[in-house]
Amino acid sequence: MLHFDKAEFDNGGFRLSADWQVPAGTKLALIGPSGAGKSTLLAGLAGFVPCIQGAVRCDGVDLAGLAPGTRPLTMLFQDHNLFPHLTVAQNVGLGLAPNLHLDAAQHAAVNKVLGRVGLEALGDRKPSALSGGQASRVALARALLRARPLLLLDEPFAALGPGLKAEMLDLVSELLQGTETTLIMVTHDPRDAQKLADQTVFVDQAVAQLPQETGAFFANPSDALARYIGA
Amino acid sequence: MAQRAQPISKVLGHAVSLGVLGLIVATGVAVALRAEDGARIGAGDWAAIRFTVLQAGLSALLSVALAIPAARALARRQFPLKSLVITLLGAPFLLPVLVAAMGLIAVFGRTGLLSAVLSAFGLPPLQIYGFHGVVLAHVFFNLPLATRIILQGWLYIPAERFRLAQSLGFGPSDIARHVERPMLITVVPGALMVIFLICTTSFAVALVLGGGPKATTIELAIYQAFRFDFDLAKAALLGAIQVGICIVAVVLTRSFPVSDGMGAGLDRRLDIRPPRGWVFTTQDAGILTIVILFLLTPLAMIVLSGLQGIATLPPQVWWAALRSVGVALGSVVVTFALVLPLSFALSARSRLAELATSVPIALSPLVLGLGLFIMLNPYVDPRAVALPVTALVNALMSLPFVARILTPPVRALRSDYGRLSASLGITGLTWARLVAWPRLRAPLGFSAGLAAALSMGDLGVVVLFADGDSATLPLMLYRLLAAYRVDQAAGAALLLLALCLLLFWAFDRGGRANAAL
């Protein structure tokens, strides 16, 4: 269960508030105009932006004292998800041991997860030798290996083009099948939300509003949402 | 809670900044306090001040005036070995002043190459010593720097602007007026200022090519005040005047951006169309030929005349070479102990770190050295610590350059990979090993090479205090020159040149080896 308890995040003077909760395993989309605070919500959750009021709790644990790396979540950024000087396998291995001292079982786990995203043959490559879609798969493989309760997507597939983006979202959906992972994804495209998310949060004017069931949310758009999607 | 690493690195950077600035102020105070009676600025000192400002101003103007057509030719022409030419433009920075001065004497001196050509036509030989010799040497050092700075300006002009100019049917003079001149107005003042500062604090050039009451820089006057009159008050006062002149220059050009000319990618292709017509072609080819000959001929003379001498070098010279390498390596260690925290603070836009890394440009290394010796004198024999003090002063003097090279990659490291590292829990030594070292090793190697070469070739503080047992190679070279042992001096110059380039190459190479990105 993820709980924003009257939480307010301060992103260099810009303040975003959220006050709601969702059960574990929810697939949640964040949608709304640029600058409304979608990325601030993710950054606050991940520990890059301080929570100055209220609290954020994951399964009852207050996240306030936790460093970004120890929070129960994995985040995929818009870019710079891979270290260009490390190989694909090393980039994935970071998810198991940040110092890259891996034992045999861990190496096997890295290879196995690369297989799950369809990159078993590319472990020795550097990211510069990958296509955009392949690089996204590497970042996803690492997220799978870390297996944290929350997966945050800050539009990591935005630069891929519509076809490839849809393919990546399908892959995310397939990989999360049968897990209790809570997914929170930022998107600009209502179709992404409809494809993947069972709940949608509209972020507008520095407030992350209450989550709503995705189908109903788009079927009866509020005025602000209608303005945003141009309906 | 968020971005834990940031405050820590800033605290360390501020501590180092305060340490550097404190040391600088303390040395100045130490020198001033030792002064027994008030300093008097005599007629000779006024002449030195006038000479310093005049030669620095003229050197800056000439360097930039020649650099503008040279940079334009490099920007708009593609030719084989162009990247080699641009690399050559970086070489004078690594060149020991004394070696360059000897090369210039071999070309422009009384018995030099040019005089030989002139005498074939029955003309009198050239005279290099004095005002024009100092300016010539300063142009030799700073024309390449100015060219790189201005070339960078050309390459920052958006390609669209040239395309727009083309589509509007601009001729070369229209392009100059609407595209190139606006860029030059922003770039040239910064270039003038940097060169003016470098020439204002010049010591070794004036020591070798100047001298006498008519061609003495402030820095040389400081040396003479200490060495011949032991007049510390005057040394301190002259040091303060020199800093004052530099401050005025900085304030006058404050609103203009300053580039260091170190940027990468100066030879990248650009769609600047060269103007048609043999006039422009001749003009571009002409200026580049002059610049290349001006840079290469003195270097070639050093190599040619040094090859014979190098075999006859006495053992003291080899020992001095060894000491110099030691000083250079020590200086690199000190430089990095200071510059790493500073560049992390700089990447977080710390004003204090900015001050600590720009003040040394204006300082008198001699006053800095004097102050250190006065402070150490009660505890140790100054001559015993001549080499460590030289290494420390060299490190402080190379801070501005090294900090400017390292700060952009450090900033990129934080902005591009800071959050990823934090979210994966990569911290501390693991972060240094897996993230910082691989990302920074190339600029670290490059800047370590620069710091090593600068220290290796420097003839500064060491002239004040070194005795026979602690002479560095540049000092040994100066003594050989002063004793008119021409062949041995030529050999020592070649050795010094080779060691400087070797040190730079080794560090730079080490930083890049296996660094596939």
Image: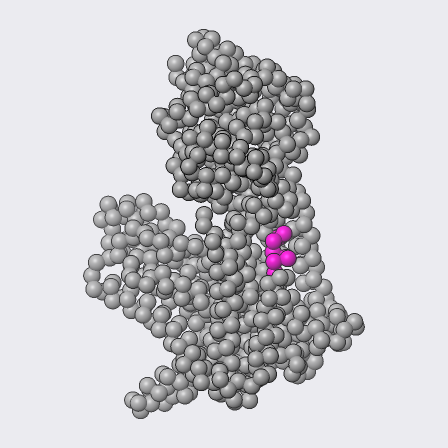
* x 33%, y 62%: residue: B82
* x 58%, y 39%: residue: A103
Q: Is residue A198 left or right of residue B273?
A: right
* x 75%, y 70%: residue: B376
* x 50%, y 21%: residue: A176
Residue B165 can be seen, yes or no: yes
Magenta highlight on residue B224: no
For the residue pair B23 and B433, the one nearer the viewer reads as: B433
- For residue A136, which quarter of the picture? top left
For the residue pair A220 and B47, the one nearer the viewer reads as: A220
Which residue ends up furthest to the right in the rendered image?
A: B378
For the residue pair B495 and B165, the one nearer the viewer reads as: B495
Which residue ends up furthest to the front in the rendered image?
A: A104
Residue B125 spot, x, y in % from top left: 38, 88
Residue A199 spot, x, y in % from top left: 51, 14
Q: Which residues are magenta?
A: B335-342
